[in-house]
Structures are given as C-alpha cells and as structure tokens.
Amino acid sequence: LSEAPTHDWEGLERSREFQRLVSERRRFVVPAIAVFVAWCGGFIVLTGYAREFLSRTPIGSLSWAYILALSLILMTWLIAWLYLRWCDRHVAPLAERLTDEDDEVRR
Amino acid sequence: MSDVRTLPLVIFGVVLAITLVITYWASRRTRTATDFWAAGRGISPLQNGFAIAGDFMSAAAFLGVSGLMFLYGFDGFITGVAALVSFIPVLLLLAERMRNAGRYTMADLLTFRLNERPARTAAALGTLFVAAFYLVAQMIAAGALIEALAGLTFPVAVAITGAAMLAYVIFGGMLATTWVQIIKAVLLLGSVAVLAIWILGRMDFNPSQVLARAADRSGEGDAYLGPGLFFAKPLDSVSTGLAFALGTAGLPHILMRFYTVPDARAARASAGWAVLLIGIFYVFVSIVGFGSRALLGPAGEKLAGEGGNLVAPYTAEFLGGGAGTAGGDVFFAVISAVAFATILAVVAGLVISASGAVAHDFFNSIVRRGRMQERTEIAVARIAAAAIGVVAILLALLAGKEFNIQFLVGLAFSVAASANFPALLLSVVWRRFNTTGALAGVAFGLITSVTLIVLSPTVWPGPDSEGSPFPLSNPAIVSIPVGFLGCVLGTLLSHEGAAARRFHELRVRSETGMGGDATVAGHA
C-alpha cells in the first residue's frame, strides 16, 4: 500500500478540515444512533415484558405491537433518508476538499 | 410427496436457465480479483440497493417470517423488523468506511490497522461460521421447498440447488451473483406485492380487517396480534430481537456488497435504496403472514409443514382459486419458483463471501503473506467455493428439514452480532483497540454463541427438548456482551503500541476515501 509520495496521515488527521468533517458527521450520527437505540431497544424490551399491552388494539384490530413495528420501519426510512441528505450537504463537500488539497500537496 | 408436479418444475427450469445465461455473460467479464469479489466496482447504487435487498430478503425472510406469523402471529414479525432496523448501524457506522478503507472482504477493515495475520484469521473464522449457519438454513429451505412443491426428494433438491449456486459463483463471480440477486429481488418484491395486495383486496383493502380475521381464526384472539406465542420466555424475544437488530452489521455477505460500488457516496446511497426496498418488503410480508391465517385458518397448518415454511405458496394457491384449479396451480408454481430463485441467489452471495475468507484472507494473506499471483488467488477462490458448497450441502442433508429456517438464520445472526460486530465497531470508533482485543472479541463471541446454541433447547439433545443447560433459544443477549467484553479485556490487558499509529491512517482514509482504490488504480 506504499505509493511514491505518501500521505501525511497524522497531519491530515490533525487538520482543521478533517476535524470539521468528523464533527459534522458526528453531529448527525450520535443523535441518530441514540434514537435508534431508544426506539428499537424499547420495542425489543416491550415484546418481552409488555405483552399484554402490545396485544391491545387501539385502532380497529391494529395492535400496539403491529403499530410500533410499522413505526420502526418508518423510523429506519427517515433516518436513512436524512443521513444521505446530511452527508451530501455537510460531509461530502469537506471530504472532497480535503482530498483535492492533499493531491495538490503531494504533486 | 412422490407425485412430481410439472408446472413448478418447468418454472424452476426457466429461472435456472435465465440465471445460467447471466452467469455465462458474467464469466466472460471476470478476470481480476476485483472482478471476482467486487464485480469490478462497477455496480450502480440503485443496482447495489436491489442486490443488498436481494441478499437480505432470503427464503427465510419470505417463507420463514410468513410461516412463523401464520403459526404464532406477531412473534414472527419481530425478527423481520429488527433485521431491517439493523441497517441503521450498517449505514451510519460501517458502509462508507468499508468502501473507503477495504478491498474485498470483511476482514480487510479489521486488518488494516491491526496486526494482519492474527486479525485476519479471526475475521475469516467469523465469516466462515456465519456463512455456514446461514448457508445450511438456506439449503434446508431449498430442499424442503422443492420437495414439497415439485415432488423431488429432499436430497435431490438440495443437490440441484447446490450445483446451481456453485455454477454462479465459480464461473460468474460477484458479477453473476449480483445480477442473479437483482433479478431475484425484483421477482420477489413483485410477487410479495401481488400477494399482499390481493389479500387486502379480499378484505376491502382494510388492514385492520386482515388482522381481525387472522386473530379470529387463530383461536388465540388478540394475543395472536401481540408477542408471546412463539417466544414463551420474555428473554427469548429480547435475545432474538437483539441478534437481528445488531446481526446485519456483522454479516459478511452483506458487508461485502459495499465493495462493489465505485465510491463512498454510492455505498451510502445503495444502503439507502436497500432500506427502502426491504422495508416495503416486510410491510407486504406482514400482510401475507396475517393474511394467510385469515384465509387458510387452522386447516392450513398441515399444508404449511412443521416450521410453517410453506404457507406462502399455499396462500397463493388459495388466492388463485384453490388446489386443482388452473389459477391455483399457476400462482402456486410462480410463488414457489420465486422462492427457489431467492434461495439460489442468497446461497451464491454467501458462498462468494466464504470463498473470500478462504482464498483472500486465509490462503493469500495468511499462508502466502500476500505473495500469491492474482490468477492463483482466483483459482483458489473457485476451489474454496466448491469445497464450501459441498460442505454446506452435506450439512443441510444432515440437519434435515424440520427446522424453521428463519430460526436457523437467527442463529447465524447471533454469531454475526457476537463475533463480528463488536470487533468491526470498535476498530472504527476506539483508538486504543488492538489486535489482541480483536482476537479476544471474535473468539469470545464465537465460542460463547456457538456453545450456547449447542446447549440451547433447540439443539440439545434434539430439537425442542426439555432440560437443556441453557434456557434461551437464541444466545445473543449473553454472547453479544461477551463479545464486547472480549474486545475490551483483550485490548486493556495487552501491550501493543502499533495499533494507534495506523489508526490515523485508517481514520483519514475511512472518513474521506483518500488513498483508496481510485488512487491505487491510477498507479497500476
């Protein structure tokens, strides 16, 4: 993996652009993971310990279990779509700039 | 089961013929190792989204989930939803990083900053175990399906499936596997959509009515619409849910798909498409699952077989007009053939990931220390694929057809979640994480999950026996924390300085895509 003009990985990692890139990504990923853990974890725990509640049918014959399961599918779609949009707007441009600058330096 | 049905066999034959033509086309485009394992990195995001969905919507997800729902109601749906949700950690934490920093296999990500040979050995073992469980589940599904639907015997059916899957992988590599996957995904989504909409149409397009009738004909009332009928113990549903919710992030054949696209953006986008398609798929499957109970009632239990695996085709037959009618026969045959195509595609994906573990990780990188010629590497991959295929066929024949396949897949997920996921995750997020940690994590996770599976009620000392040493049918709730514990203990108790240095490189490369394939290709 060693090619002629090597990258200064440590320098790159310390650079302000890289730090910004990481923190921009983190600004989305950390809360998204928190939502994922709470929602999905909550659902899984309920399937074990709130069975009577989940079997109740608040809307017609749609049970809480089914409604929550469908809400998880919606959550997955929403997080995925928001993340793709977030990366295109906030992360990808930074990565591109870093790569271009690095190419300049190594030329 | 001796009466051979002609129509399903003819449609199976057509499916086989189409996929083999694709394989021939792909074989002429497969020359380098990048072609063989990563389809030359020329797959588009939408195509890869369909292929990931294809890899994921296995026979277990279609036949197994609808079968479990038919028999036990909502419990069957838990695995499906949890499996979909697990794409969130894959998308947010792994997909782009794999594409940016790796080359062909799941092990590539780990070995980049860890001590190559031990870390690769661990990851290759993790890959092989997951692929083995998963493969056996799919082969059993294939055998049982073809036996029941076309009248061939279980061993013959397993052998046919095995031969086809080997042809795709050995001759067509990842390119053939991808296209087989895409075609199958389109067929499967289309069929499930038709089934679900037809079922809804029978009930005034009112989902609530589907559930009401299903609960009514289950004999369990509203309990059928909530959890608890399949997973008697609360911890059992929690443990199985966990295995599926974290397992995807350790499935080698899914992760490997992210290498087939040109760059990180395409990797992200393909995960996005996959999530959309798989979500739609599971919504439809849930309607088929509940709908099959509403339509067939208790009378369907005998048709559906022991694990409930065959309920979907029989529901199709019922919708088409019932057994013996032309419409019933045709619809039954079509759904059966689609399920068959599904299995073929998924086993091909599994075999190719396992061949990567053997040829790329084990032989080239560990035994030959990366000095193997590319042509030899592909040759070894083909031989490995053949060997893995034969072993899987034998294991499937040994295991027999009584298992519910979604359940067997659950075990594969728990090995993936316990052995692979902790090490993959920590290698990305934890600066101190080192080789010993990875080894200990994979070893702890693998040993715990496999041991607990052997000691569980499903296996010990025969299916569904009482008095097994480990009370839960799925080990994830114990083995995932043990896997993480192994990673942490191994890291903290060992003294290695090297890992932190390469962390800088891995970090920059995985976040930006710098120094990746594009650059390397420019030099070649």
Image (cartoon, coloured by chain):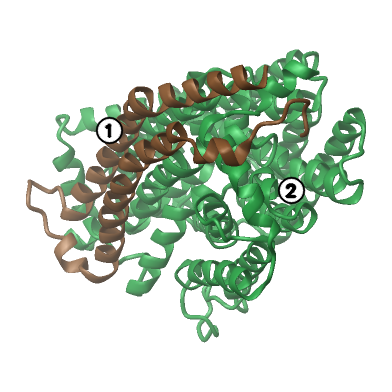
Chain colours: A brown, B green
Residue B515 x %, y %:
65, 29
Secondary structure of the residue carrying tag 2 is helix
What amino acid is labelled 2 in the image?
Answer: Pro
Name the residue beneath numbered marker 1: B199
Which disc is residue B155 wearing? 2
Residue drawn at 53 percent across, 78 percent down: B465
Q: Nearer the viewer, residue B220 or B399?
A: B399
Q: How many marks?
A: 2
Residue drawn at 36 percent across, 66 percent down: B238
Please state, as top left, top right, bottom left or bottom right, where the N terminus of chain A lies in the image: top right
Q: Quadrant of residue B10?
A: top right
Q: Nearer the viewer, residue B394 or B198?
A: B394
Residue A8 x %, y %:
64, 35
Image position of B295 (left or right of B71): left
The disc numbered 1 marks a residue on which chain? B
In the rendered image of this protein, does residue B44 appear above or below residue B56? above
Q: Quadrant of residue B224?
A: bottom left
